[in-house]
Amino acid sequence: DAGVTQTPRHEVAEKGQTIILKCEPVSGHNDLFWYRQTKIQGLELLSYFRSKSLMEDGGAFKDRFKAEMLNSSFSTLKIQPTEPKDSAVYLCASSPGNSDYTFGSGTRLLVI
Amino acid sequence: GDSVTQTEGQVTVSESKSLIINCTYSTTSIAYPNLFWYVRYPGEGLQLLLKVITAGQKGSSRGFEATYNKETTSFHLQKASVQESDSAVYYCALVPDTNAYKVIFGKGTHLHVLP
């Protein structure tokens, strides 16, 4: 099953550290999304790529969050420096260019 | 802007009882939105539960149903008899029109089914 692969599944970081989350989208999907999931805010869009071009980066997250997509099969989300309030589940999703999203299992980040 | 409002927090239901999770939406699009329910089971990724793109129609999956009501702008999720395995977080979502790329999610409802 060639779904969306996210690594690592879990990450623990100390405040101030830099962490990099990774995502491999479904082969052939043109769109890739990074979301942050928390109980309070639900799902918040961090970044959106279409054909490797950054189309949208959630304004509130520009400061310390940077997503990149160097090729069509791999994307990273860097958080630098991390803060305790960044503790959340980070989800990557891809789609063929419509609303048929495929989500990864997510990376659970804990910043202490 | 576009938004989705759903039953917030945790909902606790005993096994074999009925369930309803409320969802209403708002959109500035002149087109009718596509509506979705996503589910995240413990330890798994977010996955599509059901999708309805035509107003007035009903979607169903795994015993769950939701009817797209454009008059009340609602898309409530219902199940006649829940099982313990239904315990999960449920998200109502919309896409403003068929050509839009961005899915707008509600904040999620955590369903806890008691055995």
Image (tube, coloured by chain):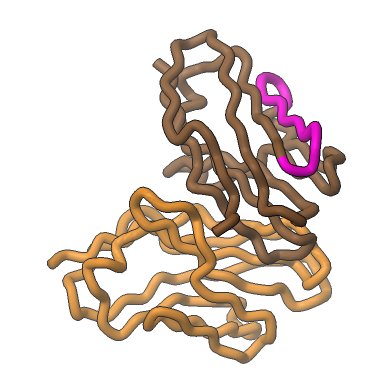
Chain colours: A brown, B orange
Q: Is residue B13 magenta?
A: no
- Where residue A43 sits: x, y (%)? 55, 47
For the point 75% across and 67% down, which residue is it? B96
Closest to the observer, B56 or B59: B59
Q: Which residue in the rendered view is the most extreme toward the bottom?
A: B56
Give the image quarter of residue A77: top right
- Where residue A92 sits: x, y (%)? 61, 44
Quadrant of the rendering where the N terminus of chain A is positioned: bottom right
Q: Which residue in the rendered view is the most extreme toward the left?
A: B115
In this view, A5 is above or below B53 = above
Q: Which residue in the rendered view is the most extreme toward the top?
A: A16
B80 on left or right of A99: left
- Where residue B91 sits: x, y (%)? 49, 61
In this view, B9 is above or below B73 = above
For the point 61% across and 58% down, which residue is it? A102
B65 on left or right of B28: left
A29 on left or right of B6: right
In this view, A73 is above or below B31 = above
In this view, B5 is above or below A54 = below
Give the image quarter of residue B113: bottom left
Report how many numbered discs are placed on residues in the image. Answer: 0
- Where residue B54 sits: x, y (%)? 69, 86
Provide the residue span drawn in magenta.
A62-73
For the point 47% across and 76% down, which residue is it? B76
Quadrant of the rendering where the C terminus of chain A is positioned: top left
Closest to the observer, A101 or A39: A101
For the point 64% across and 60% down, which residue is it? A101
